[in-house]
Image (cartoon, rainbow, N blue to C red):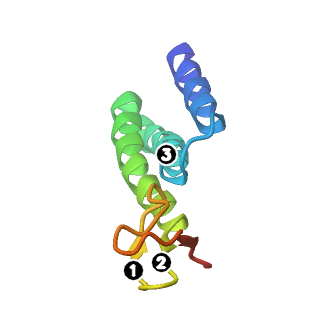
Amino acid sequence: MKKYTVVVLLLLLVMAAGCTSTQKGAGVGTLIGAGAGAIIGHQSGHAAEGALIGGAAGAAGGALVGDAMDSKFCPVCGKQFGSDVQYCPADGTELKVMQK
């Protein structure tokens, strides 16, 4: 149990340290997936394995959701980019965040 507490605290610290939405999504997905995996795995006596598998799946899903949250577009050419790009590589225009 102590091991899980340390992991949770480290993930919360990473999420609070100004990470991108993709990284925050991966962190939250890991927590949720690990919790669900541990509960499911506990029923068959494999809570640790379930937590690892659930955490990995949750991280992948959370990263995809987080990346989609911060998509940007160029108001001039209309191309879409991830949250890590600030200026359009084609024309140099500052990118705008897409409204959901």
Determine if residue 7 is in view.
yes
Q: CA separation, marks 2 and 3?
A: 23 Å
| The furthest residue to the right | 16
Q: Amino acid at mark 2?
A: Cys
Image position of 85 (left or right of 16): left
27 sits left or right of 46 in the view = right
Q: Is residue 74 above or below residue 20?
A: below
Q: Give the x, y percent position of residue 7.
A: 52, 24
Residue at 49% x, 49% y: name it. Answer: 29
Numbered circle sitting on residue 79? 1
* Residue pictured at 47% horizontal, 47% vertical: 26
Q: Quadrant of residue 49?
A: top left
Task: Say whether residue 90 is left or right of residue 23.
Answer: left
The relative height of residue 12 versus residue 98 in the rendered view (above or below) is above
Q: Residue at the spot x=52%, y=70% of the render? A: 95
Label 1: few (<14), some or many (≥20) within 10 Å? Answer: few
Q: Position of residue 48 (x, y in %)?
A: 39, 28
Spatial separation of the CA atoms under disc 1 and disc 2: 6 Å
Query: Which amino acid, mark 1?
Result: Lys
Q: Which residue is mark 3?
A: 23
Q: Secondary structure at mark 1?
A: loop
Q: Could you tell me residue 94's position as x and y percent? A: 53, 68
**Residue at 49% in and 69% down:** 71
In the structure shown, which secondary structural element does the residue marked by tag 2 occupy?
A: loop
Structural crowding at the residue carrying mark 2, measured as other residues with C-alpha within 10 Å and reported as few (<14), some (14–19) or many (≥20): many
Q: Circle 3 sits in a helix, a strand or a loop, which is it?
A: helix
Residue labelled with disc 2: 74
